[in-house]
Image (tube, helix red, strand yellow):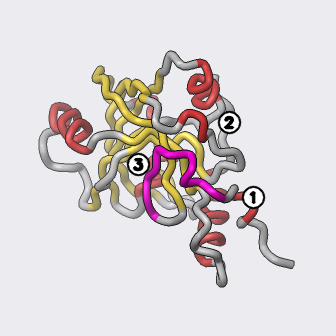
């Protein structure tokens, strides 16, 4: 069993505060999220085998990943660049709940993550629940976090991804040296 994740809406508010904060030092590269980053062509090939070439919804994701830690207080820099096995076990296009309780729709692959490395296993065990790869959506991609995958179409595909971080500077890195600030250092409102 994985550790419980904080409420995704609370984390979004924290992220929006940081993003909108005036006077933010943009040279600091804190981790927005860590995860397993996947090859676009590999993900699209699996999606096409499952549902054909047309996405379920109009808005599509251009870079595919599995978020493991959103706004982490402690980045797992020691495992950046390691390969992670991604088992695609389900497919769902359906309802997702927004912050205000209204319903939107997202399309995602339900996944399980695996590694033989003990530290990577620990890192994954500490991560948020509901691992998935968003494919398409109506409102926002992150609403895939609220989808109920218990009725997802069962599938069986295996991909390989690389563990890394999406940084505040708007890029993905697999190099721990690129991370120079912890989220805790920039997330507290000034008094």
* Span shown in magenta: 170-180
In the picture, measured across the screen, residue 180 lies left or right of residue 169, that is right
In the rendered image, the residue lying farthest to the front is 177
Q: Residue 4 — which label?
A: 2
* For discs 3 and 2, the disc positioned in front in the rendered view: 2
Task: Report crowding for label 1: few under 14, some 14 to 19, many 20 or more residues within 10 A (C-alpha).
Answer: few
In the rendered image, the residue lying farthest to the right is 191
Where disc 1 sits, the SS reads helix
**What residue is rendered at 16% in x and 38% in y?**
48
Where residue 36 sits in the image (x, y, percent)? 44, 38
* For discs 1 and 2, the disc positioned in front in the rendered view: 1
Where residue 147 sits in the image (x, y, percent)? 47, 43
**What residue is rendered at 34% in x and 60% in y?**
138
Q: Is residue 49 magenta?
A: no
Q: Residue 184 — which label?
A: 1
Where disc 2 sits, the SS reads loop
Asked if one can make out residue 148 in the rendered structure from this viewpoint, the answer is no
How far apart, in angstroms, are the residues tagged by discs 1 and 2? 20 Å
Task: Report crowding for label 2: few under 14, some 14 to 19, many 20 or more residues within 10 A (C-alpha).
Answer: few
How far apart, in angstroms, are the residues tagged by discs 3 and 2? 22 Å
Q: Quarter holding the C terminus?
A: bottom right
Q: Residue 132 — which label?
A: none
Where residue 141 sits in the image (x, y, percent)? 41, 56
Counting residues from the start of the chain, the first of labels 1 and 3 encountered is 3
- The residue wearing badge 3 is 95
In the picture, measured across the screen, residue 18 lies left or right of residue 59, that is right
Where disc 3 sits, the SS reads strand
* For discs 1 and 3, the disc positioned in front in the rendered view: 1
Counting residues from the start of the chain, the first of labels 3 and 2 encountered is 2
């Amino acid at each position: 069993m994985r550790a419980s994740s904080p409420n995704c809406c609370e984390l979004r508010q924290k992220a929006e505060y940081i993003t909108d904060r005036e006077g933010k030092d943009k040279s600091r590269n804190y981790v927005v999220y860590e995860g397993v980053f996947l090859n676009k062509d590999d993900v699209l090939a699996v999606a096409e085998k499952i549902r054909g070439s047309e996405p379920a919804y109009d808005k599509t994701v251009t870079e595919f990943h599995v978020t493991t830690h959103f706004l982490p207080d402690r980045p797992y820099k020691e495992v950046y660049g390691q390969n992670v096995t991604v088992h695609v076990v389900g497919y769902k296009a359906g309802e997702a709940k927004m912050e205000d309780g209204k319903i939107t729709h997202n399309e995602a692959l339900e996944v399980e993550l695996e590694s033989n490395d003990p530290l990577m296993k620990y890192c994954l065990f500490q991560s948020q629940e509901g691992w998935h790869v968003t494919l398409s959506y109506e409102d926002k991609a992150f609403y895939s976090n609220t989808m109920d995958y218990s009725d997802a179409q069962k599938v069986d595909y295996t991909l390989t991804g690389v563990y890394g971080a999406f940084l505040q500077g708007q890029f993905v890195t697999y190099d721990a040296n690129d991370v120079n600030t912890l989220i805790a250092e920039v997330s507290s409102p000034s008094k």
